C-alpha cells in the first residue's frame, strides 16, 4: 500500500467530486477510497479547511473531514510536531507558512506530496506527484 501526503486544495477538489490535477492523482485518491492507498492529511490542512469553511469559501466542513477520517483507515492525520516544523525550516523557496508546513510534512515523512501549487511544484526539496 502506497502513502501520499495531500495539500488543502487537492483534498477539497477531490471531496467536491472534481478531478484532482491529473489522471494519475485522481487514480491515487480513488484507490485510497478503495483501500489501496493511504492519504496523509497534515493537521494544517485540517485547519485550513475549517477556516475556509468558516469564511464560506468552501462547502466542505471540518466535520465532514473528521467523519471521513474516523470511518476510514486510508485517510490519516499527521499531527504537527517539532520534527516537522524543523524540516519545514529546511525548505527554501516556499514563502507561505501553510504551504511550507505541508511540504515539510511530506519531506519529514519522506513521502510524495499531492499538490497543484506552482510554488511547491518548483521546489526540488519535496517530491510531488504529477
Image (cartoon, grey):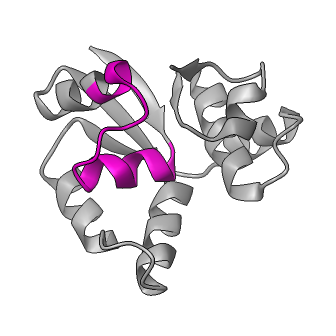
x, y (%) of residue 12?
37, 55
In front here: 85 or 96? 96
In front here: 43 or 127? 127
In front here: 25 or 110? 25
x, y (%) of residue 97?
76, 57
Q: In the image, which residues are magenta? A: 7-26
Q: Is residue 36 left or right of residue 81?
A: left
Q: Quadrant of the N terminus?
A: top left
Task: Report whether residue 43 is seen.
Answer: yes
Q: Residue at the spot x=32%, y=22% of the render?
A: 23
x, y (%) of residue 109?
57, 26
Above or below, 126 against 70 in this view is above
Q: Residue at the spot x=30%, y=39% of the render?
A: 19
Q: Is residue 77 left or right of residue 88?
A: left
x, y (%) of residue 121?
68, 29
Work out which residue is located at the far bottom of the displayed protein and give it. 55
Q: Is residue 13 covered in magenta?
A: yes
Task: Report whether residue 78 is seen.
Answer: no
Total count of labels? 0
Amino acid at each position: 500500500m502506497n502513502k501520499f501526503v495531500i495539500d488543502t486544495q487537492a483534498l477539497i477538489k477531490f471531496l467536491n467530486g472534481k478531478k484532482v490535477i491529473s489522471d494519475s492523482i485522481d487514480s491515487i485518491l480513488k484507490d485510497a477510497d478503495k483501500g489501496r492507498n493511504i492519504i496523509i492529511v497534515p493537521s494544517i490542512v485540517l485547519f485550513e479547511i475549517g477556516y475556509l469553511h468558516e469564511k464560506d469559501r468552501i462547502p466542505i466542513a471540518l466535520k465532514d473531514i473528521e467523519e471521513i477520517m474516523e470511518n476510514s483507515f486510508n485517510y490519516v492525520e499527521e499531527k504537527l510536531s517539532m520534527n516537522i516544523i524543523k524540516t519545514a525550516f529546511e525548505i527554501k523557496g516556499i514563502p507561505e507558512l501553510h504551504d511550507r508546513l505541508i511540504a515539510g510534512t511530506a519531506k519529514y515523512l519522506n513521502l510524495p506530496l499531492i499538490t497543484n501549487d506552482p510554488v511547491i511544484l518548483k521546489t526540488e526539496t519535496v517530491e510531488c506527484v504529477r
